[in-house]
Image (cartoon, rainbow, N blue to C red):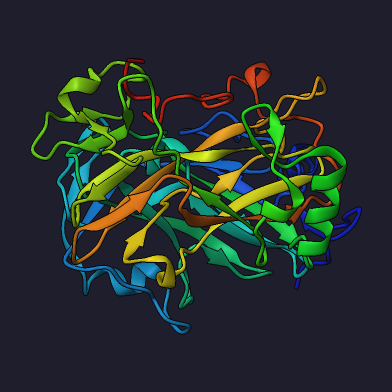
Amino acid sequence: MAADFPLPGPGVLPSQWLDRAVKAGLVHWDTGALDAPAIQPASLDLHLGDVAYRLRCSFLPDTTHTVEQRLEDFVMGEVDLSRGGVLERNRPYLIPLVERLDLPPNVRAKANPKSSTGRIDVFCRVITDRSYRFDEITAGYSGRLYLELISSTFTVKVHPGLALNQLRLMSGRSLVTDDELLDVHRRSGLLFVGDDAVPAEDFAQADGVFLGLDLRGDDAGVVGYRAKRNSRLLDLGEIGGHDPDEYWEPVVRERGNQVVLEPEEFYLLLSAESIRIPPEFAGEMVAYDPTSGELRTHYAGFFDPGFGYDEAGMPGSRAALEVRAHDVPFMVQDRLRVCKLAFEHLAEPAETLYGEAIGSSYQGQVSTLSKYFRKP
């Protein structure tokens, strides 16, 4: 077994340590498909290979088989992505990724869709050999990475080299406790409404902080968007190249700042609170609480250090919330708490932060639409 990778302490690896991890051989990639890894402030982008396997159902390989050993039981065909491949709605696909891992025994990994992916209702998760869990990669894992992808609303066109999800490397305990969070919030602010920090008595916590919906909207009462079904092909290789009116319809609030979510429709809404993540932390949206209602409130979960933050005291950035109600129509009201953001320690403060300097797409966002669409 490989020796431990020397780290400055427990937590999520920031950009400077991800660079060292790559140079130490923890991450490998097909150099014919990718010149260099794409390192973000606290994550690595993962890139599509050149083939997608059409599956008859989702699966996990279990603890005794590799993914390839199980594929013959599930594959119904192949899609060549080399010139762009069209992936149908509501069909699971498995795509081998360009990167592979060779982790030491003190480093584990976690994957999550990128924000732009979640905002188009593309659900994707990583599968590894001899595993019974999605997206969680055990310490010491050595092998390939595969992406299971399901587009529930749009028919999409994908290309080799696209980054639809991302990976964090971490070691030891990383979760920030509620007491630690409240102390940081009192000192420097983590959640804001407008330019003001949320009062400590309204800083709702339970292994993270709760976020509510903004259903006040703009002057016209528009609070977000609902996806149109049977719209045009969405080419994920075209950034800013799609007319949002062909894919989305505006959602207008009702009297009393509330909205009825139709079952199984996909909505993009904004959080009422703005989030500020300082250089020593990273964030992750965690699984929704079913006691809050029959709805799912996010599909993409990583928030990098620097989101909503600058040294001048930027009062946060709002989060885009991908929402789907299940089974029955569901009424949501302004400031209803529907999701939770957990904070994680970094192994040391990040030297590269989310924001304009690195071309981040959603700093200071006031719209929920993905980067694939022209700004309205």
- Quarter of the image for residue 294 reads bottom left
| x and y percentages locating residue 152 in the rendered image | 22, 50
Residue at (52% x, 27% y) in the render: 362
Q: For this rendering, which residue is in front, 202 or 47?
A: 202
Residue lying farthest to the bottom in this orientation: 64
Where on the picture, by quarter, is residue 67? bottom left
Q: Nearer the viewer, residue 179 or 108?
A: 179
Q: Please determine whether, in this image, residue 68 is positioned above or below residue 351.
A: below
Query: In the image, 287: left or right of 81?
Result: right
Residue at left 45%, top 67%? 134
- Residue 229, percent across and down? 11, 40
Residue toward you, 186 or 231: 186
Residue nearer the viewer, 277 or 108: 277
The residue sitting at the left extreme is 230
Q: From the viewer's perspective, is residue 170 above or below residue 221?
A: below
Count of numbered badges drawn on the protein: 0
Position of the C terminus, as image quadrant, is: top left
Please state if 229 lies on the left or on the right of 9 as rendered.
left
Residue 93 visible in rendering: no
Please report the residue visible at 72 percent of the width from the left and 55 percent of the height from the top: 201
357 w.r.t. 165: above or below:
above
Q: Is residue 204 visible?
A: yes
Quadrant in the picture for the N terminus = bottom right
Q: Residue furthest front?
A: 256
Left or right of 373, for residue 4: right
Query: Please, is residue 214 above or below residue 77 in the view?
Result: above
Q: Is residue 124 left or right of residue 28?
A: left
Q: Position of residue 90 (x, y in %)?
A: 17, 54
